[in-house]
């Protein structure tokens, strides 16, 4: 199966941590990218954050200014859904909430042509459940990037029960064309990585709750002695505690409240306090 031609525009909905990174990846692969967010100014801010990150590469001589300018020309912040109509692939990276994602997918089906592929970057919600109310559920596929999307190679391509083989194969080939390492997964809660990662976060949070050690010590041990790139608290600060907590809750509920996946009270408290991690300057650590 051929990847999506680079002449076909891509739309990314949600210009937060993931959406901006995915827009960068699609833009660097040569697509025109429409970037939309419901929060006023967020799509422009997403494009600006791409510019800021890559300008540092230009300043260090690792990227040509002309390539950055061309990339930024290809990424177009838009304010209304109807401006995405000509996209051949729409990737949603909005809040991790079944009903809100379903409602967006319904709006997209009413807008987009029959051949447009709709992809979800959900970390944990069943692709089958997301597609259940769609008129054409065969066109929905999981395209799950990792954070930060421009740097992390892995993309999980997730087939729901109704996802067509051709759609999954096209997205798999497209992820490869974009320089990623795609793997296929079925639509089990948390798919592959977020399933395997649950105990990593959960046990670390339990150790913290039991006051066995503090976050900085545990992160340092996991990094320096364990050889991980990041410790669990640094990583969840990067992911966003709202997102990580929503993912844990989703996996927990999907497995009929299996206590192995019990969400952490420590993380719940961070979310309630609005300490979401790097994205707003305070999580386990301070970033201001
Ligand atoms: P985020 O909070 O950084 O960004 C989400 C953005 O979506 C916000 O800017 C918000 O304004 C916007 N939004 C919410 N509802 C919308 C709607 N109906 N229409 C348009 N925009 C809307 O979240 P994120 O970390 O980028 O996560 C987004 C998705 O990606 C979630 O499904 C999450 O599970 C998944 N994901 C997150 C990570 C991670 O490490 N953070 C990794 C992989 C996948």
Image: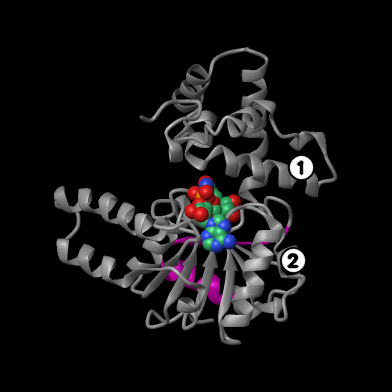
Relative to 233, residue 218 above or below: above
In the displayed orientation, state which residue is furthest to the front.
Answer: 40
- Tell whether position 181 is magenta: yes
Kindly tell me whether residue 192 is visible in this rendering: yes
Question: Hey, which quadrant is residue 258 in on the image?
Answer: top right
Instruction: Judge from the rendering whether residue 282 lies leftward or rightward of residue 7; answer left or right.
Output: right
Quarter residue 21 falls in: bottom left
Q: Nearer the viewer, residue 189 or 226?
A: 189
| Residue at point 45%, 77% (across, down) | 83
**Dot 1 crowding, Cα within 10 Å, few <14, some 14–19, many 20+:** many
Indicate the quadrant containing the C terminus: top left, top right, bottom left or bottom right. Answer: top left
State the residue position of label 1. Answer: 252
Mark 2 vs 1: CB contact within 8 A:
no
| Residue at x-position 68% and y-position 50% | 190
Q: Is residue 3 visible?
A: no
Compared to residue 251, the image places residue 121 above or below, namely below
Count of picture labels? 2
Q: Nearer the viewer, residue 281 or 201?
A: 281
Q: Residue at x 63, y 79 (%)?
A: 109
Mark identifier at residue 128: 2
Of callouts 2 and 1, the N-terminal one: 2
Examine the structure image and report whether residue 235 is included in the region drawn in magenta: no
Q: CA distance from mark 2 to mark 1?
A: 17 Å
Looking at the picture, does residue 155 appear above or below residue 223?
below
Secondary structure state at the residue bearing disc 1: helix
Judge left or right: residue 228 versus residue 51.
right
Instruction: Judge left or right: residue 163 versus residue 1.
Output: right
Residue stretch rendered in magenta on the structure: 169-187
């Amino acid at each position: 199966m051929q990847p999506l031609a680079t002449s076909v525009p891509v739309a990314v909905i949600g210009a937060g941590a993931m959406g901006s990174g995915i827009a960068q990846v699609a833009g660097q692969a040569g697509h025109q990218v429409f970037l939309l967010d419901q929060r006023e100014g967020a799509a422009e801010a997403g494009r600006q954050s791409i510019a800021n990150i890559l300008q540092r590469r230009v300043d260090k001589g690792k990227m040509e200014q002309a390539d950055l300018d061309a990339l930024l020309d290809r990424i177009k912040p838009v304010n209304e859904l109807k401006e995405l109509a000509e996209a051949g692939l729409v990737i949603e990276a909005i809040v991790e909430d079944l009903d809100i994602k379903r409602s967006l997918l319904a709006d997209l089906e009413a807008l987009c042509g029959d051949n447009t592929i709709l992809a979800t970057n959900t970390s944990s919600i069943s692709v089958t459940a997301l597609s259940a109310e769609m008129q054409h559920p065969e066109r929905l596929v999981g395209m799950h990037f990792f954070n930060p999307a421009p740097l992390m190679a892995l993309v999980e391509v997730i087939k729901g029960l109704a996802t067509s083989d051709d759609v999954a194969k096209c997205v798999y080939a497209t992820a490869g064309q974009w320089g990623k390492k795609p793997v296929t997964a079925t639509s089990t809660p948390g798919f592959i990585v977020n399933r395997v990662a649950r105990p990593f976060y959960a046990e670390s949070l339990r150790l913290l709750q039991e006051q066995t050690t503090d976050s900085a010590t545990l992160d340092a041990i996991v990094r320096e002695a364990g050889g991980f790139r990041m410790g669990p608290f640094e990583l969840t600060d990067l992911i966003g505690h709202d997102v990580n907590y929503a993912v844990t809750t989703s996996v927990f509920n999907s497995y009929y409240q299996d206590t192995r996946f019990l969400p952490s009270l420590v993380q719940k408290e961070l979310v309630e306090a609005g300490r979401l991690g790097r994205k707003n300057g305070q999580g386990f650590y301070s970033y201001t």
